[in-house]
Amino acid sequence: MKYMNRLTNVIIGPISNEPVFWSVIAFALSFSHILGMLPESMTEVSVYDVRNILIIFSGSAFISWCLSAIVWRFGLKNIKCLLYVIAFLLMATDLFLLFNFGTILSSWILLLVKETNPTESSEFLSRSIFTGATLKCLVLTVGLGVTTYCMERKPKVVRFKRDWQRAVCALIALPLLTLGAYLGFWSVRLAGLNSQFDIEEWRAHHGSYALENTVTNLFYSVKYLNVSGHDNATAIRTCVDAARQPASSTEQDSLNVILVIGESYNKYHSPLYGYYLNTTPVLCSQQQNGNLFVFKDVVATYNMTTFSMKNMLSTNRISDNEAWHERPYFPVIFKKAGFNVSMWDNQRPSGADVSCFDYALGSYLYAEDIMPIAYNEHNTDTYDYDDDMLSAFMKESRSYENRRSTSKHSLYIFHLMGQHSDAAKRFPSSDDLKVFKASDIRRADLSDSQKQIIADYDNATCYNDYVIGRIINMFKDSPSVIVYLSDHGEEVYDYRHFVGRTHERNKKKEAIKYQYDIPMMIWCSDKYIQNHPQHIERIRQAVGKPMSSDILPHTLFHLASIKTPFYKPENDVLSKEYVVGKRILQGYIVEEASSLRSRQ
């Protein structure tokens, strides 16, 4: 019994002796996060939302418990005022951002602050500080401060008349503090990570739950900004140096090279790769006409957008131990070779509400030093649907055509939202676009709701096919070549009851198949086929060769007939000198690429 009393005293002591401090700090560190995840109507709160609230509050409750224990045990009453001020400032900052911009503190916000000059700062404050949203933030923060001051003037200690009362309170607090301690353990692990990949992998496991309090989120945002800043700075210097290197195209006639990057595309949900539903009627028609060449064995190097894209767009090769930031971004080479480069990115970070993953990529692709050497034009807005982005492109590019230089070569890059989760939100909710329904899914082991998730994914795939078809129509009457591939794959109840991607080190072959195998295809207009019979023959010979997405730029250089010191024929799947390397996924060797076909 003595040991039990000691245990309950350890658990309850900081709370019962500093009840005001513990409750106020726990509230201040979790309030903005709870507000940010709640639905607009309280009638829509689900069990899932309640679970998230408990997770959010547990992390804040544990941090507050630790601070209360320090204040109580060491008698540091004077430090309470400082801790209150810090907690209120953090809460006020998050509430200001949440009410005005729909976001909380993040690496992207810190980057914007870092890059904002005094004039821009004053203009920003003048627009935002005298708003109803800011007034609401001020009222909540001051109200909490006044309430705390009144309660702390007559501090009370919660005393229990019976031991069983203390034991019951300890049993109630123990699960909450245990979960908070577990999240705190994940936060401590973050402190030892020093690379972007490790931090993103940390977050992809359980780290995202650990961020659901103001303190840990601030620490994460600062650390991620610092770590990514080093790699980005190296990459930018590499690109600036590459822009000074010679590059040219031997192409005599006009040429359009178009790169279309999909998102979360499970190729086994396309009849081009054996699926039983016709989710890609446009592409199947183009294949039958002889304009589309479908590659059979291509994998993404990562199942995370940030690192897959960075390695796909840089001229490095991972199996040669080349880091993405050590080799230049390939549009820089195209622009140096005389191509007009147009970048239309429907995942481009815009505004204040930017996820960490969008920040990691956008802070590089749209850095101030990158844009003038990589693009002639680029979009500034993003769109609910990819087709809307194409409509904006066609409208704005017409005026661009009238003012661009006399260059006859162009590179167009379209980065789509594709089948990004939630797939049901990736196509307009009109009946004519809901081609497939739950009853079309031949899976007796799944419920109707699970079948509907697959049907929604297949509808998003069909909509993606329509978008690609529209891009084809834009360029079908000109000498043009389109390369399409996805950043990574996606599981959609393919062999187990799971949707999405996982980040464990030792994946099963089935998980590798659906998460890393990606579609890749090359479409050639009739004029391109007529002008480049030698390229067409090499494409036909290459469709069965194993390939990783990180060597894509070298194939694009081949298709555009670009001469540059950064082109390596051994990395070009269309070259006779192409060398099949080891298959490296998520930064580690999985197997030899030549043996990959055996798992399919």
Image: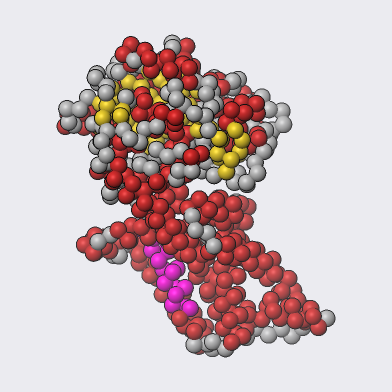
Image position of 60 with respect to 240: above or below:
below
- The quadrant of the rendering that contains the N terminus is bottom right
The furthest residue to the right: 1
Q: Is residue 26 left or right of residue 539?
A: right
The furthest residue to the front: 577
Q: Name the spot of residue 345 as percent of width and height, x first.
A: 36, 38
Q: Which residues are magenta?
A: 83-104
Residue 260 visible in the snapshot: no
Q: Residue at x 39, y 56 (%)?
A: 229
Say how the picture is coloured: secondary structure
Q: Quadrant of residue 527?
A: top left
Q: Is residue 447 left or right of residue 419?
A: right
- Magenta: main secondary structure equals helix
Q: Residue at x 45, y 81 (%)?
A: 82
Q: Nearer the viewer, residue 294 or 10?
A: 294
Image position of 465 with respect to 29: above or below:
above
Q: Name the spot of residue 286 as percent of width and height, x first.
A: 44, 15
Image position of 452 with respect to 311: above or below:
above
Circle count: 0
Q: Quadrant of residue 483?
A: top left
- The quadrant of the rendering that contains the C terminus is top right
Q: Is residue 510 left or right of residue 574?
A: right
Say if the magenta span includes residue 274.
no
Q: Nearer the viewer, residue 327 or 358?
A: 327
Q: Name the spot of residue 399 as percent of width and height, x first.
A: 20, 31
Say if the magenta span includes residue 97.
yes
Q: Residue at x 48, y 65 (%)?
A: 219
Q: Name the spot of residue 131 as percent of width and height, x first.
A: 31, 62
Residue 278 visible in the snapshot: yes
